[in-house]
Image (spheres, rainbow, N blue to C red):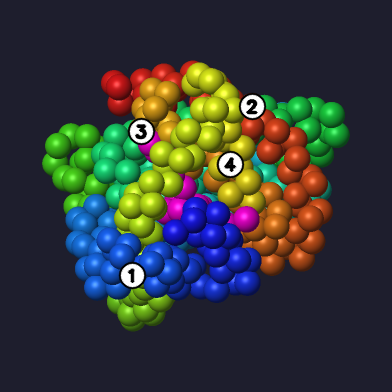
Amino acid sequence: MSLTVFFAALLVMIAIAIPIGVVFGGISILPVLANPAFPFTVDAAVRSMLNGLNSFPILAIPLFMLSGVIMAKGGISKRLFNFFAYFIGNKTAGFPCAAIITCLFYGAISGSGPATTAAVGAMAIPFLTGMGYDLVFASAIVAVAGGLGVIIPPSIPFIVYSSMSNTSTSALFIAGILPGALIALGLMVVAWAYCKRHGEDKARLQENYETIRAQGFGRLLRESSWALLTPVIILGSIYGGIASPTEAAGISIFYALFVSLFIYKSMTWRDLLPMLREGVKTYAAIIFIIATATTFGRVVSLLQVSGAISEGVLSLVSGRVGVLLIINVILLAAGMLMDPLVSIMILTPILLPLAQTVGINPIHLGILMVCNLAVGFVTPPMGMNLFVTSNMTGVPAMSIAKKAAPFIAAFLVCLLLINFVPQISLLLVGA
């Protein structure tokens, strides 16, 4: 079957808004329908779907999702925000930077960009506007910083990439720490420059800062320490050899239940069943997409798509730098049009062989894929974080996108550093 016809059919199915799981399943049996001699029958496709779900690492996805839902019920975003504001609230852009750091830490709990944006935005945006900051500016900060939720471990996109590329989930988790911190620092620099240029209501900021300080460090630490310990417990159990990522996800659920039920007392046992229902509804769609994406990857391999694309790219550019630039352009475009999980499932079997051809480490590629796709959270037309904040504030998504432009530029500068300084991703992994 012609690769042109194959990808044209794929793009048409996506363009007319067919559910992506159906797209993967349909496109996977298209070659055998066009040519009965193709060595991947419908029966083989079904077996491949079942085998794709027979993966212990993938089990971590619903567990981390449920853990994030439970912790969100605990209202931890405000506790985290107050803790960070205690140290920097009296500095220039102190409260906006506290919102960015809160997104960074909340990402270590939710593993999701939109979930981080929603949880932190619901608390931080009203607070920042109450301090005199522009509503669109506050919305833009949270929308862009919410993308850190998929870069800081535990990240759901890292788990999906791991299953598609046969790389270590644990290694990807730890490799995301420094890139996530670097991007957060870049966003804070832009926030500082904005506040320096446009000014702040120092009297009102100082008043609220004193209110937070009056609570006392001990009280703030007691209230926020349970949330701050979450990434420590998850990553510590993994890298201490106590648990695998999937087992750590299970541990995080019990920890989240303990904190929400007995420490914060923000939920009751009656709340648990609705949370489970919410988690099942969300994960059911993802699990079907993962199953059909496995068959898609198999068909891509049999059609030798990766080899053809590698030859085409290498005929246009030579060397690692050129290939990296092309990969980034593809990923940025994909992030603007598709959900990050879908993009990873489609592009990993295509881009991984190309990257390995020029010596790009698979773990480094995973970090690049997720960081690039995180930009898509705040770039139209997909821009999920834009729509999350727009729904919360009533500000048009395009207005938020325009205000977010300097933050996106800082994100891209950090992304360039992550591209061309691989040790930012690989230093903690030791690769």
- Nearer-N-terminus badge (1/4): 1
Q: CA distance from mark 3 to mark 1?
A: 35 Å
- Looking at the magenta stretch, what is its main secondary structure? helix
Disc 4, SS: helix
Where residue 255 appears, as percent x and y from the top left, is: 27, 56
Instruction: Tell me which residue sits at (78%, 33%) in the image.
Output: 194
Q: Which mark is residue 36?
A: 1
Nearer the N terminus, badge 3 or badge 2? 3
Residue 161 shown in magenta? no
Task: Say what secondary structure mark 1 lies in.
Answer: loop
Residue type at the position of mark 3: Pro
Q: Which residue is mark 4?
A: 330
Residue under the image location 21 percent in, 41 percent down? 237
Is 113 placed above or below 311 here? below
Callout in the foreground (3, 1): 1
Looking at the image, is mark 2 or mark 1 earlier in the sequence?
Answer: 1
Q: Nearer the viewer, mark 1 or mark 4?
A: 1
Give whichever of 47, 211 is nearer the camera: 47
User: Callout 1: 10 Å neighbours few (<14), some, many (20+)?
Assistant: few
Task: Look at the image and give the residue range highlighted in magenta.
Answer: 337-353
Q: Quadrant of residue 411?
A: top right
Distance from disc 1 to disc 4, alpha carbons, whole Å, reads 33 Å
Q: What distance separates the C-alpha of mark 4 from that of mark 3?
A: 17 Å
Mark 3 or mark 2, which is nearer to you?
Answer: 3
Of mark 4 and mark 2, the one earlier in the sequence is 4
Looking at the image, which is closer to me, 20 or 429? 20
Mark 2 residue type: Val
The relative height of residue 326 versus residue 375 in the rendered view (above or below) is above
From the image, tell me which residue sits under label 2: 413
Question: In the current view of this chain or complex, which residue is farthest to the right?
Answer: 198
Q: Is residue 45 left or right of residue 111?
A: left
Q: What amino acid is labelled 1 in the image?
A: Pro
